[in-house]
Image (tube, helix red, strand yellow):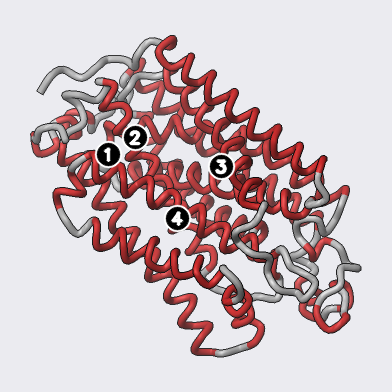
Amino acid sequence: MSAPASSSTAPGSTAALAGKFLIAGIAGLVLTALGFLLTNNHQGVALSYLVGISYWTAVSIGMLLLVMIHHIVDAGWSTVIRRQFEHGTSAFLWLAVLFLPLLISAWVKPGLVWPWMDLSHEIHGGHTVGTDILYQKKASFLNVRMFTGMTVGFFIVWVWLSSRLRKASFAQDSDGEVKWTFMNRKTAAFGIPLTALALSFAAIYWMKSLEYHWFSTMYGVWFFANCMRAAMAFGVMITCWLYARGDYKGIYNTNQFHCLMALAYAFVVFWAYVTFSQYFLIWNANVPEETFWYNIREHGDWVYVGMLILFGHFFFPFLFLLSYRRKSTRGPALFISIWIATIILIDLCYNILPALKDAENQPLPFLSINLLWVLTSVVGVGGICVWAYLRSFPTAKLIPIRDPRIVESLTHHEATAP
């Protein structure tokens, strides 16, 4: 095995690429803003932007959790790829900034995104939100002030934890002190439950409350599963890119790669368990306040989207990744990771976009102009997130060269590279 690179590639090697992603991100955001300003489809554009923000926040949350899980279990094999997830968490600050338009809309135009913010919003039966008994029971939780404070709190938690973990990890490259390892382990000990609570409440406030009549005890866990799957999918993409560039050659071997894909495979099953449990409990109870959420998604083309999620999110990845070769070879693993990342985006659309209703209170079709705004939002927010990653990339070593577990990681089963 060749000697590991002592530092990442020169800043200039990623600066140009970072600039391209920044331009793409700005272009996507500008197009989304123009769609909002120049069309009458204000709610459609706003909800599409929520899809984009939620998607990339999920990726960053998953990366943060992977870093903390690495520290809390004192993992060895993942040390060589941990740094890439640390760079990925640098996007949180920018995600907080990009979420501001949604927060501003909550105060300036209540009900634009989340109908319960407008107490005069008419719901079924001729009632309004303000006179709805279910809203009245939840009003102490579902109000603009609480929503704003909680959302700001979510990002404070994520930004603080990621900054604390990054600072200690990068400092260890310089002095090699083991105290940084212990510090990150302590951070992970309280950071994991904090992040779990934050992501659960974020999913409830941002997505589940779009249909505030709905009840589900599994929703936060569903979002957690998607966060982890998205982070590992992008982790595979990043490591394949670095290996193709030559950065990881002689460092990242087949068994390390297989461990990452095996963990991704485990979360394929976990997502299916959580999603099936949510559906089964609601179907079995057969309570109208719960079943309506699925019923409205059985109209129009949404039923086909549901089938695509069922087979594309579970059955296809499950069967595809049964093979050891596909889990340990970069080509097939990269393909299925891109597939999973795409299906997660469709899953978020399935959870968010049916909040757009027609005159008969039925969801607008999935195949509509709103998909264009989803695309521009995903490109816009994603371009900024990738730019943040590439901007952080040259600021630290390629791998944590003085981490106590680095030798164990580099010699993980002493296998050849994928």
Q: Which mark is residue 78?
A: 1
Q: Position of residue 368 (x, y in %)?
A: 64, 56
Q: Secondary structure at mark 2?
A: helix
Q: Identify residue for label 2.
A: 82
**Residue at horizontal 49 percent and vertical 89 percent from the top:** 284
User: Which residue corresponds to mark 3?
Assistant: 158
User: Quick check: 13 above or below 107?
Assistant: above
Which residue corresponds to the image point at 36% horizontal and 22% vertical from the top-left?
172
Contact, mark 1 vs mark 2 (Cβ under 8 Å): yes
Image marks 4 and 1: residues in contact by CB distance under 8 Å? no
What is the secondary structure assignment of the residue under circle 3? helix
| Mark 4 / mark 1, whichever is N-terminal | 1
Query: What whole-number distance in Å separates the C-alpha atoms at marks 4 and 1?
Result: 25 Å
Rounded to the nearest whole Å, what is the CA distance between mark 2 and mark 4? 25 Å
Q: Amino acid at mark 1?
A: Ser
What percent of the width, then of the height, locates residue 393? Answer: 43, 22
Residue beneath disc 4: 343
Depth check: give the residue in front, 214 or 241: 241
| SS for callout 1 | loop
Say which label, 3 or 4, has the lower sequence index.
3
What kind of residue is marked 2?
A: Arg
